[in-house]
């Protein structure tokens, strides 16, 4: 029988703080050897190098959700990323056909530090979303709106999209997902990242005059006139990533003035002014392959999270890589996953006293899965 994890963790966390990285790394590797194929350690590209070094697989959000969906042999997934990613892994790894194939045994998904959230996901609370949907229904026919949520959102919002004919997207498939949505309805309500929604829709010929921004803190129609909503094709939720919001068009101009041949490579969570003038825009996965495929000697200024840019610099000494902003933009919540939390959560898992298990409730998981499977089916 498993111990009550909330009151009796086998190992207390503070003790881990006092250990050196070398010791923690050795202990993590010992657990990896002991659990073998039963353990799958997934890492997002924004994780710190020390953590990434222990991951079985690393990827962007789309690749990580595919990995969680595809794995057949593991009993535990330890997710080195943020909360919405662990929720998504739980939903996909424990979907009905997988559970059936394992005779009902669940895969436990662990997030090493529960404080590893995402401020962007927190900008679209489910009550706010439900209120907005109701308000929109007073002006528009909601049957003719597809709700689309970026994967960077709580499971409750994914479930809302599933229930209302909607879908999830990631930064690597947002255009294909919007196309899917427009084959069904004439409007989209896009959560929670206004920049990804806007940057993607602009590439499809939808203008800003057709993309009002819904401010959940405004009492009347998200701060929009009825005319603006009636004209809309994509209604953008007023959310953003605090990391990518820091990159500015002025940074691009400064680099181009200093290095005339430089290529600007950014993530589509950056504001439109930056995205519009970049040479390449794409998910973390695309940023990596773009650099990998470039000829030696290429100069880059990259606008995405600091740990990924620093890793690219180390892995590609043959290229000249700069960080696009003079201010160091790092994701403080991704950074919460460190060797101490990883070792603590792994040792408790191995001792049968798991901590920080992420389990989405059944109804939310069922409807989120509808929206996630629609995404995984979009080509
Ligand atoms: P991708 O890895 O999908 O590009 O996502 C970036 C991000 O902000 C993750 O939180
Ligand atoms: Fe959220 Fe931005 Fe951090 Fe990604 S980089 S987890 S979107 S705050």
Image (cartoon, grey):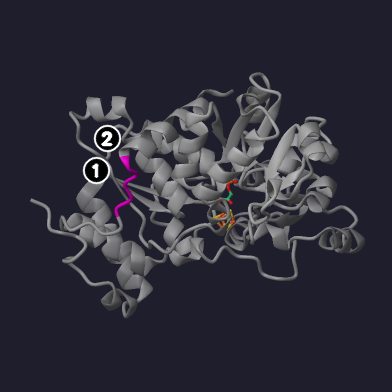
Magenta span: predominant SS is loop
Labels 2 and 1 touching (C-beta < 8 A): yes
Dot 1, crowdedness within 10 Å: few (<14), some or many (≥20)? some
Q: Position of residue 8 (x, y in %)?
A: 16, 66
Residue at image location 67% in from the left, 51% down from the top: 238
Q: How many numbered marks have been drawn onto this rendered protein structure?
A: 2
Which residues make up the magenta segment? Answer: 357-361
367 displayed left or right of 333 = left
Viewer-closest of 302 and 152:
152
Residue at image location 50% in from the left, 47% down from the top: 126
Question: Which mark sits nearer the N-terminus, 2 or 1?
Answer: 1
Residue at image location 28% in from the left, 72% down from the top: 13
State yes or no: Cβ of the residue under disc 1 lies below 8 Å from any atom of ligand 1: no
Q: Position of residue 195 (x, y in %)?
A: 71, 48
Name the residue that disc number 2 marks. Answer: 73
Name the residue that disc number 1 marks. Answer: 38
Q: Which quarter of the rendered picture does the C terminus lie within?
A: top right
109 displayed left or right of 248 = left
Viewer-closest of 192 and 323:
192
Q: Position of residue 374 (x, y in %)?
A: 51, 26
């Amino acid at each position: 029988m498993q111990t009550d994890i909330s009151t009796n963790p086998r190992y207390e966390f503070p003790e881990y703080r006092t250990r050196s990285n070398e010791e923690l790394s050795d202990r993590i590797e010992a657990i990896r050897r002991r659990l073998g194929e039963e353990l799958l350690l997934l890492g997002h590209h924004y994780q710190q190098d020390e953590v990434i070094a222990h991951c079985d697989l690393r990827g962007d959000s789309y690749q990580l959700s595919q990995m969680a969906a595809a794995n057949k042999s593991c009993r535990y997934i330890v997710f080195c990323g943020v909360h919405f990613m662990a929720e998504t892994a739980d939903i996909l790894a424990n979907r009905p056909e997988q559970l059936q194939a394992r005779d009902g045994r669940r895969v436990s998904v662990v997030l090493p530090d529960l404080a590893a959230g995402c401020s962007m996901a927190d900008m679209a609370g489910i009550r706010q979303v439900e209120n907005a949907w109701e308000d929109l229904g007073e002006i528009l026919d909601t049957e003719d709106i597809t709700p689309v949520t970026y994967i960077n959102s709580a499971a409750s919002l994914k479930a809302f999209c599933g229930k209302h004919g909607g879908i999830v997207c990631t930064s690597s498939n947002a255009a294909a997902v919007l196309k899917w949505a427009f084959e069904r309805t004439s409007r989209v309500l896009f959560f929670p990242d206004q920049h990804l929604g806007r940057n993607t829709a602009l590439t499809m010929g939808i203008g800003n005059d057709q993309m009002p921004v819904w401010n959940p803190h405004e009492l009347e129609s998200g701060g929009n006139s009825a005319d603006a909503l009636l004209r809309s094709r994509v209604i953008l939720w007023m959310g953003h990533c605090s990391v990518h919001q820091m990159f500015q068009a002025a940074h691009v101009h400064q680099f181009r003035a200093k290095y005339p041949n430089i290529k600007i490579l950014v993530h589509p969570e950056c504001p439109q002014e930056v995205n519009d003038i970049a040479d390449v825009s794409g998910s973390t996965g695309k940023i990596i392959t773009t650099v990998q495929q470039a000829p030696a000697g290429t100069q880059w200024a990259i606008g995405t999270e600091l740990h990924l840019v620093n890793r690219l610099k180390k892995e590609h000494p043959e290229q000249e890589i700069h960080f696009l902003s003079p201010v160091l933009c790092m994701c403080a919540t991704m950074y919460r996953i460190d060797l101490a939390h990883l070792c603590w959560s792994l040792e408790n898992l191995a001792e049968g006293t798991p901590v920080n298990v992420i389990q989405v409730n059944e109804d939310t998981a069922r409807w989120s899965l509808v929206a996630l499977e629609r995404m995984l089916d979009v080509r």
